[in-house]
Image: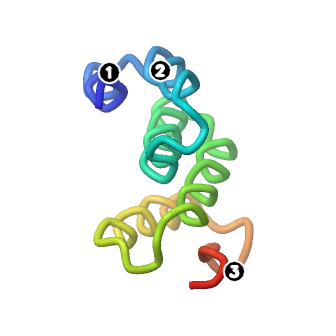
Amino acid sequence: MPARLQLSQNRADEALKLLGALKPDAYKALALELKGDALVALKRVDEARTAYDEALTASDSAAPTRAFLEMKRNELGNASATAPTKAGS
């Protein structure tokens, strides 16, 4: 994903622009996770926390990458006691 490449090149602003141009449901959980990563790089922690929360909500509870996403979210501190879960999961 080009946004991940831009993040690896310390170009978080450009990554956010690419992610904003995605279709609403195209790889939603992954796009929101990358958005959180970009916002962390820009030191916009509250916005990153929200992006990670939205990514967790959009991801399948059995997704193999979910634990890693939860770890990233938890490293930002908790605005609530628990991470969100996908409805019906």
At x 60% / y 48%, what residue is drawn? 51
At x 50% / y 28%, what residue is drawn? 19
Mark with earlier residue (3, 2) = 2
Q: Secondary structure at mark 1?
A: helix
At x 29% / y 72%, what residue is drawn? 64
- Find disc 2 in the rendering and name its residue: 18
Dot label at residue 81: 3
Which callout, 2 or 1, points to the residue nearer the camera?
2
Between 1 and 33, the one lying in front of the other is 1
Residue sitting farthest toward the bottom: 89
Q: Amino acid at mark 1?
A: Gln
- Find disc 1 in the rendering and name its residue: 6
Check disc 1: other Cα within 10 Å, few if <14, some if 14-19, many if 20+.
some
Mark with earlier residue (3, 1) = 1
Q: Position of residue 74 (x, y in %)?
A: 52, 67
* Residue 21 position by quadrant: top right
